[in-house]
Amino acid sequence: MAEDLLIWGATGQARVLHELIGQGQAWRLVALGDRQAVPHPLPASAVPLLYGEAALLSWLAGRASLPAAAAAIGSDNRARLAVLAWLQGLGLALPSLVHPRAFVAADAHLAEGCQILAQAAVCSHAGLGRGVIVNTAAVVEHDCQLDEGVHIAPGAVLAGECELGARVFVGAGAVLLPRLRIGADAVIGAGAVVLHDVPAGARVVGNPARPLPS
C-alpha cells in the first residue's frame, strides 16, 4: 500500500519528484507546500496547496496521522538541508526517494532525505549523507562517500573512491577521476574534468578543471 507523502517546494524539483513517485507504488502525494505562493505550482489540483508554515501546521493538525515528507529544493543545498531539519522537527519522516529506473547497489548506504533520479546509478559501497541528490543519469561509483547536502547534477560521473564534503555541487556532465577529495561547499562547473583535489569553497571549471579567479 502506498504511503502518504508531502512535497515541500512547489517549483522545478517538485515536478521531478512528482514524476518519480508517479512511476512507482510506494508513495502517494497528499499535499504540496512552499514558503510562498508560486506562479506555476505543480499541477496537482487533487491535493492541498499549502503556502507558509501556518498553513502546513493547520493542515497537519487536521490529519489522523503524519505523512512522510520530501524537500523539493534542487538549486540551494544549504536551504534543502534547512528544510529537511524543519520538517523533521515537525515529526515528519524523511524517506529517501529512488526512481524505479535508477540503480542503487544493495550494499550502498543512503541517509534520510536523499533523491536518486531516473537512470542514475549509486554503486557498491557508496555512502550518501542526508539530503543528497543524484540527478538524472548521474553516476556515483563504488566506495564514493558524499557528505550531507551534496547535489550531483544530470550526467555527472564520480569515479570510484571519491570523497565529497558537505553541500558540494557537481555540475551537469562533469567528471571526477578516482580517489579525489572535494572540500565542503565547492562547486564543480558543468562539463569540468577534475584531475586533482579541490579545496573547500573553491569553484573549478574546464578540462582540465582550474579554479575560477576569486
Image (spheres, rainbow, N blue to C red):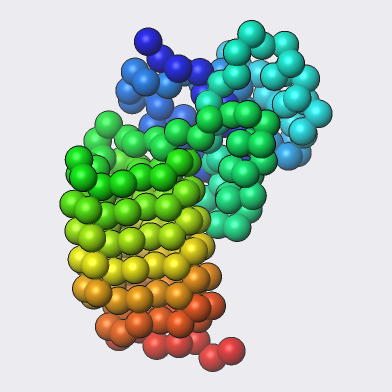
| Residue lying furthest right | 54
23 lies left or right of 106: right
Q: Is residue 177 above or below residue 148?
A: below
In the image, 122 versus 14, the foreground residue is 122
Q: Quadrant of residue 57?
A: top right
Image spot of residue 53 (x, y percent): 77, 33
Q: Is residue 77 above or below residue 99?
A: below
Image spot of residue 34 (x, y percent): 68, 36
Q: Give the tally of numbered discs.
A: 0
Image spot of residue 111 (x, y percent): 41, 45
Image spot of residue 208 (x, y percent): 30, 85
Residue 153 visible in this rendered orientation of the protein: no
Image quadrant occupied by the C terminus: bottom right
Q: Residue at x 52, y 70 (%)?
A: 185
Q: Residue at x 43, y 60 (%)?
A: 147
30 lies left or right of 24: right
In the image, 153 versus 45, the foreground residue is 153
Q: Residue at x 33, y 61 (%)?
A: 145
Q: Residue at x 30, y 41 (%)?
A: 118
Q: Quadrant of residue 153?
A: bottom left
Image quadrant occupied by the N terminus: top left
191 lies left or right of 149: left
Q: Is residue 201 above or below residue 72?
A: below
Residue 179 visible in this rendered orientation of the protein: yes
| Residue lying furthest bottom | 213
Q: Quadrant of residue 213?
A: bottom right
